[in-house]
Amino acid sequence: MPNFDSPTLLCDEALRDPYPIYRRMREKGPVYHDHLADAWCILDFDLVRDVLQDSNGFSSHHLADRAEPVLGARVLAQMTGAEHDEKKAVTMRGIAATAMDGYYLPAVERVAKSLWEEIGTTRRTELVCDLASPFAIEVTSALLGIDAQWRRKILPWNRSVVEFITLLQQTPDERSRRLADAGYFRAFMLKLIESRRRSPRHDLVSYLAECGSSAGLTDDEIVALALNIFLAASEPLDKTLSYLVHETLRTPTLYEAVTSDSGNIPQMLTETMRLHPPVQIIPRITVGSQDIAGTKIPDGSTVYCMIGAANRDPSKFSDPDQFILARRENSVRKAFSPSADHLAFGSGLHFCIGAMLARRQLETAFQASLPYLAGWQLSKDALVEHGLYTRGPTELVLEKRK
Ligand code: 2IO
């Protein structure tokens, strides 16, 4: 009989502020069985990393139900062995060829600046809506090669795909609406792939359309990969940019540190990723029964790697809830590689392939934002955050300095 007094992720409080819930779960031990969610929550840094690094004992089979119905085919996170390595290599080469070409980052900078110029004509701004979201959509669309005229159309389709994958509960009606939207998004992407194959451009869809097939990707897999990249690149980007701005305006010494020496920007981003990881849950499924820190978990169980809890594990980070620039235990040197001291990009075989891209996009956008930030201050109760699987600001209100 489930005990409903026990902490659970399936409640409104978890969506508003999950950190107190993580602490209540942790008080019961490093592995907590959430009866309502029917998931084993792993809360300690070292245990989360162990699970993520053991891709044989802890599989990504959940994505067959969580992602495949909307993406239409298997994605890299579901693959292992030679297939995984080959398809991942071509995808990473495609990202490097389109994003690190000397043109992309200057375009990212122009997008950020032009959004700030627009904001400059007002006295009050809600930054998620006016800067962070349009920034994330524009630079991700530019990367893939989705023209401006399509962006408004694909936005609700992408929303549905993100929600299908990341919401822990959905009604049958919501589920079928999201499946239908995903179908439109896939049809759109298939047409784009065919069109870029006929007349290639310098963008990621063209690259995958041409080189993906030679690496053994079917067209359905290229569609799935393109949708996966669109959501995985855009969904965490606006959240992290909003947090960067909020932390900077909230603490004058931080603002001083990043404006006086742009060498501090990577460290600013590193600590933001630790304290506010936009992906809070990485699920896995046990293969065979597993023992984690003395807790027996049966075969086929859902395990949630709780990234937000692990990144604030007090045995790993001193004063874990504090934003500390240049934290020794959160080294900037490794922060965007699989040996990072934080787990915001996961760990092991399925470590985020976009980590370096995210770093470049965010450093560029943040650097471009700094001169504009001088004219603004946070409004009272400026920040509203929401979400659990992916979590970030939904409101960040600034007003012109007097
Ligand atoms: C989306 C959840 C925003 C990924 C999944 C099919 C695979 C994978 C992740 C991240 C972040 C998104 N999982 N990116 O957690 O590609």
Image: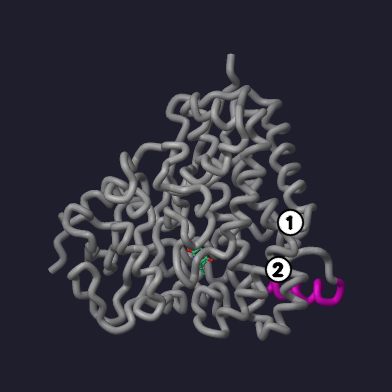
Q: Residue most toward the right?
A: 199
Image quarter of residue 321 = top left
Q: Report x, y in % for residue 133.
A: 60, 46
Residue 198: percent from the left, percent from the top? 85, 76
For the stretch drawn in magenta, what is the main secondary structure?
helix
Disc 2 versus disc 1: nearer the observer: 2
Q: From the viewer's perspective, tell me whether residue 371 is left or right of residue 380.
A: right
- For badge 2, the amino acid type reads Gly
Which mark, residue 94?
2
Residue 306 screen position, x and y as percent: 35, 59
276 up-or-down from 125: above or below: below
**Which amino acid, by three-letter code, is at mark 1?**
Ala
Q: Quadrant of residue 95?
A: bottom right
Q: Mark 2 packing: few (<14 Cα in 10 Å), some, or many (20+)?
A: many
Mark 2: C-beta under 8 Å from nearest atom of ligand 1: no
State the mark number for residue 333: none
Q: Position of residue 222 (x, y in %)?
A: 66, 76
Magenta-span inclusion, residue 233: no
Residue 197: within the magenta? yes
Q: Residues within 10 Å of mark 1 (few under 14, many from 20)?
A: some
Location of mark 1 (residue): 142
Helix, strand or loop at label 2? It is helix
Q: Is residue 325 left or right of residue 23?
A: right
* Mark closest to the chain's N terminus, 2 or 1: 2
- Residue 140 visible in the displayed image: yes
Q: Residue at x 65, y 52 (%)?
A: 137
The residue positioned 49% from the left and 25% from the top of the image is 253
Numbered range of the magenta stretch: 187-199
Q: Say above or below: 302 vs 19.
A: below
